Image: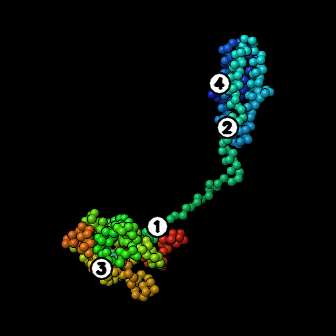
Amino acid sequence: MAARRGICRGGSRTAPAQLTMIIDEKVRKTLAELGVTDAAGLDALFAEVRAAMEQERSELISRGATSEAERDERCKDLRDRWLARKNGLLSMLDEHWLKASSKELKPTVGRSFNTLRQAAVTLEVDCLRREVQVTEVQYVKLAAELVPPPDLTLPGNRRPLGSLHPVTQVQREIEEIFLNLGFRIETGPEIESVYYNFDALNIPESHPSRDDWDTLYIDAKTVLRTHTSPVQIRAMEKYGAPLYIIIPGKCYRHDNPDASHTPMFHQIEGLAIDKDITFADLKGTLDFFAKKLFGEKIRTRFQPSFFPFTEPSGEVAISCIFCGGEGCRVCKESGWIEVMGCGMVHPLVLRNGGIDPEKYTGWAFGLGIDRYAMLKYDINDIQLFFQSDVRFLKQF
Ligand code: 2NL
């Protein structure tokens, strides 16, 4: 042990006990008994005391406490150990070293003693308490008492899996059929210029669809697109002919909502432009599409119609998917359900898209995806799609 009688700075965990013992012993002896007779010896001795004090203080700080009460008690213990009037280490030091010192050494001892006393201020309870952290251990312990630990063998919480919106599902099915036929998907802006939405499509100023009653205007030259057709013009300008594209997307009309109308709805339009494209290509492709989507037994019917952007124009109906053509509530006893408009692209529209109508011809169609989803899932109110009612949506 003799070898360890000095201060062991940053020493091992066992050091404090010995250190304490040593300091405790030393303050009970006089300087003469300790063999300290000069300034150098005094400096070494006081340095030792100071280091012991620092070490005990920093040990307490780094150890922390698990409750405020425990922290306060530890701080008070350390303070009393060093600063108590009766039997505190500094009191004893005062008694045995200072008061009992020789005349020659007394001024030096006094100075060192005062310095030490100033340093000891950091042992005052309030001061020390601020530095000793109360760790969470107590809260963890407390929580463990109040709340039983989790049973790790229980199965986890299942998060309900979402699914694609029914309109999106139908959109994907339609896209798939045309992608397999070699069409590409094209998209474009929902806020559109009056030019692309109407003029380029040969829809004249006088046409009722341009009226405020039917169209949502942003300003005199800008609208929320009323169909996806403007994207077709943009695609003609961008890619030229030949062109095989479908355009899915949201469209907007100034409609009051009811069971079959919402101000926002979804459309898919298709466009095929190439050399020698005829109405026969249109009929063949749309009949193929209807059979793929609704089933091979479905028949199609083409009736004449009118659109400003196609000539000739047609209305496509499928044999009723509910009654097979016999006549029922859904087909209003007609045996047919109208599913899309179509036609040969008007030469003026081709020209507006930068395509020479002398060289190229094309067909186009447009359909409402929401209506297809209503047919597919037998839904009688279009508004159900847009009310975000989970009870409705989770069925798909
Ligand atoms: C309907 C009718 C249709 C088109 C859309 C179209 C687009 C261009 C040129 C020619 Cl750029 N036609 N689209 C053609 C015929 C009908 O939609 O009832 N949609 C729900």
Residue 8 marker:
4
Look at the numbered disc 4 and give the secondary structure of its residue: loop
Mark 1–mark 3 Cα distance, whole angstroms, equals: 34 Å
Q: Residue under label 3, please give it.
A: 313
Residue 164 marker:
1
Which label's residue is closer to the chain start, 1 or 4?
A: 4
The quadrant in which the N terminus is found is top right
Which label's residue is closer to the chain start, 1 or 3?
A: 1
Instruction: Say what amino acid the circle numbered 3 marks.
Output: Ser
Tag in front: 2 or 1: 2
Res 112 → quadrant: top right
Q: Residue furthest right?
A: 86
Mark 2–mark 1 Cα distance, whole angstroms, equals: 57 Å
Q: Residue furthest left?
A: 358
Tag in front: 1 or 3: 3
Residue 356 marker:
none
Question: Who is closer to the viewer here, 351 or 152?
Answer: 351
Look at the numbered disc 1 and give the secondary structure of its residue: loop
Q: Is the residue marked by circle 4 packed among few (<14), some (14-19), or many (20+) residues within 10 Å?
A: some
Instruction: Say what amino acid the circle numbered 1 marks.
Output: Leu
Q: Residue placed at 42% from the left, 81% from the top?
A: 321
Which label's residue is closer to the chain start, 2 or 4?
A: 4
Q: Is the residue marked by circle 3 packed among few (<14), some (14-19), or many (20+) residues within 10 Å?
A: many
Which label's residue is closer to the chain start, 3 or 2?
A: 2
